[in-house]
Image: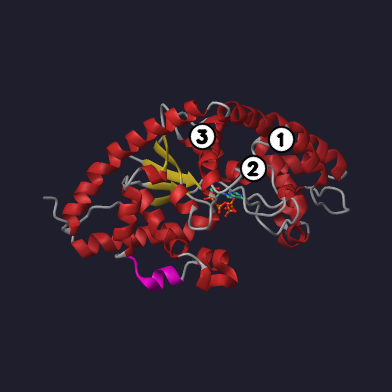
Amino acid sequence: MKRIFSGVQPTQNVHLGNYLGAIRNWVRLQDDYDCIFCIVDLHAITVWQEPASLKAQTREVAAAYLAAGIDPKRCIIFNQSQVPAHAELAWIFNCVARLGWLNRMTQFKEKAGKHRENASVGLYAYPNLMAADILAYKGTHVPVGEDQKQHLELARDIAQKFNNDFGVNYFPLPEPLILGPATRVMSLRDGAKKMSKSDESDYSRINLTDDADLIRLKIRKAKTDPHPLPGPEILTDAAAQDARPEAMNLLGIYAALADRPPEAVLEEFAGSEFSRFKDVLADLMVATVGKIGREMRRLQQDPAEIDGVLRRGIEAARAISDPIMREVHDIVGFLRP
Ligand code: AQP
């Protein structure tokens, strides 16, 4: 059986990058895999989260999953903190993983930045928790973006070392699931930075809950360059692409939302002015993302519906992870009197 685990952190507003880079791909996987989609609130608190906002942010991510088309009858949707296996297995993995392995993780270096001494221990040990997320369900496949590949490698190393240390063949080595060319959505204000929940400028991102007027305004204000749109030849010229990151970003977003190959989009718009292209992009975004946002707003007005989905997901997740944790206790040698 192939089992997928993946998640989004309820850190702030869910945005177009989370949708195109993750959630939309998951919708396409639910027919072929046994899918577990988590709202990873334990990961979220590795950086400060206002307790008063965290619950609403958690429901917002759940609403995004549902509105985007993840079917709670076929997939397990729940929030991480409510299934004890995650924190418990992460602790065991803290004792399996080596300091040297974590020291090599580039995402910690990027996120902690210059304030390394002041970063939480949780942020440092984040990859061990991610390994626990996957292995608490014996997950076999993880849809990963470029930024998570190193963490998945570490999860494989942890599974392998656990199996070696205890002389068992217990945990599978989870495989990355590469889903065609990755859509990495960049900031609308700076094509060199990824679109991110934590960017101070709300104009850098399209939140899934933005209404039609705000989507149009943000696209109109998105940074571009003074040249007309390039033709398909730019796709084989890395230097030309590097020189026009904002143009390439808007083209990539359009191609992803239209579900068309970038070549076809470039052929259609080669030589057009950005003002015209932005109108077409905004129309497409209102039709696609705007629809998801409307459904999210409807769901968010009825927290009982979201909470019901999460409660059923928590039960289903525990039904899988509780027996696995009992076996792990036996393997590690914990007494269960
Ligand atoms: N800009 C992006 N383009 C493509 N994919 C993206 N993802 C995030 N940003 C982009 C993918 O979304 C999934 C969930 O991400 P996350 O919530 O775990 O956190 P993150 O990657 O740290 O996302 P943010 O928005 O940048 O959050 P903050 O600002 O809180 O750090 C992942 O699969 C990720 O690849």
Q: Secondary structure at mark 2?
A: helix
Q: Real-space Cα distance between discs 3 and 1?
A: 18 Å
First to last magenta residue range: 97-103
Q: Residues within 10 Å of mark 2 (few under 14, many from 20)?
A: many
Determine which residue is flagged by label 3. 27
Cβ(mark 2) to ligand 1 < 8 Å?
A: yes
Q: At x 69% / y 41%, what residue is drawn?
A: 255
Q: What residue sits 20% from the left and 53% below the top?
A: 329
Marks 1,2: beta carbons within 8 A: yes
**Of the residues shown, which amino acid type is indicated by label 1?**
Met
As rendered, which of 14 and 138 lies closer to the eye?
14
Q: Main secondary structure of the magenta part?
A: helix
Disc 1 residue lies near ligand 1 with CB under 8 A:
no
- The residues tagged by marks 1 and 2 sit, at their Cα atoms, a distance apart of 10 Å
Q: With respect to residue 276, does 335 lie above or below?
A: below
Spot occupied by residue 18 in the image (x, y as percentages of width and height):
58, 45
